Image (cartoon, rainbow, N blue to C red):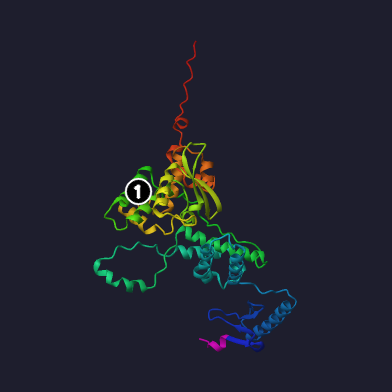
Amino acid sequence: MASESALKHSLMGGKLHVYRRENSGQWQCSTYLAGKNHRVSTKTDSLALAKQFAEDWYLTLRGKVARGEVKAEKTFKEAATAFEREYEIITDGQRSPAYVRGHKDRLRLHLNPFFGSMPLSQVTASAVQEYRIKRLALPVKVKPKAPEPAEKADQKDAAKKVKEPTRPARTTLHHELVTLRQVLKTALRHGWLAHLPDLTAPYRSSGKIAHRAWFSPEEYQTLYRATRARAADKKNHRRKAAAHLHDYVLFMANTGLRPDEAARLEYRDVEIVDDEGSGERILEISVRGKRGVGYCKSTQGAVRPFERMQERVKPEPTDRLFPTRQTMLLNKVLADTGLKEDREGQARTAYSLRHTYICMRLMEGADIYQVAKNCRTSVEMIEKYYASHIKTNLNAAAINVRRQPAPASVA
């Protein structure tokens, strides 16, 4: 076998290399110019002819660089750095810090390790498909069983172990590709990329519509009865927190607020009014959330919980209605009542109370456009995720139509 020194030779003061792979008879040549590696086959097995070809090719390439015909190609990592700098400045005040941080985390953890060193011209539909396959080929995450009492002593050591990567959820992978598209659009605006590659997933049509976890009327009744019983239990040392959770459940299920909107809500944002259209006492709420400032009108079921919170806290106008998160106590109640997951295995959270509000309104015949406006979302979103699985939206009289038989002809 030939030695390594015989398989590689340097020319032009080390700027040009002529080499031959062990499994190939022809010589190759390579150089680094204008921020990019260039290589080409000499198409000869003669070392002397290969060196002559390489020198001519190198001098020609240097002339093209000097005339500006060969430009340095940006890498994906450079485009990602430009995107991070621009996105945070341009979207200041429009996107939450957590959303911006999500883009940075996806680039740091997944996209840059895979695409980072690639020239932008090599980030093709094929490369994106390879990335998609790499991520989906990971093992599925298995929910760990509850540890035995003897195993609890080893939990601290287990927490220090490096977690093995697992297959991302469909939404997680979608968010990664959104970040990838944003980086490529940044490169396109700067003229570093000729066109965007096709990022759509092949072999797949539109996915199934996943109905969002909500509480049916019977399940919602079970939930608020459980929270009411906890609030009324005099032996409960966290009785005040339980009372606040009970009012939180009723308030959220009768307003349709997002949890982040409720977390920002101050007492000065809520007003009890007599609604002229319905003749009921309701809450008029100024909402500040992901869609900016909006407005919400509650059902009458939200008035009494709000009054109880005022009586309990004696708040200032700038105090928040829900200064602490209700996640832990709500999860405890859901687990105790067997309501933590719906029949499809989807976990219920505080967001499920918003979904319950929307479904309840549709089941009671509310106008879908008015529901969308009151919840600060679109009709399309409600039709896609809520209305399609509510049986009261189906008109049996319009479905079960029977054609009347034609009268018999008289001879």
Going by the image, does 145 lie left or right of 35?
A: left
Q: Nearer the viewer, residue 198 or 389?
A: 389
Above/below status of 246 relative to 281: below
Above/below status of 216 relative to 20: above
Q: Nearer the viewer, residue 316 or 333?
A: 316
Q: Is residue 22 magenta?
A: no
Q: Nearer the viewer, residue 156 or 314?
A: 314
Instruction: Name the residue at 31% across, 70% down.
Output: 155
Q: Amino acid at mark 1?
A: Leu
Q: Do we see residue 61 in this rendering? A: yes
Q: Do we see residue 205 in this rendering? A: no
Label 1: which residue?
223
Residue 210: image location, x then y, percent: 45, 50
Residue 248: image location, x then y, percent: 40, 51
The local secondary structure at tag 1 comes to helix
Above/below status of 76 relative to 94: below
Q: Locate residue 359: give its quadrant.
A: top left
Residue farthest along the top direction in this orientation:
411
The residue range painted magenta reads: 1-7
Going by the image, does 225 lie left or right of 36?
A: left
Residue 139: image location, x then y, percent: 40, 64
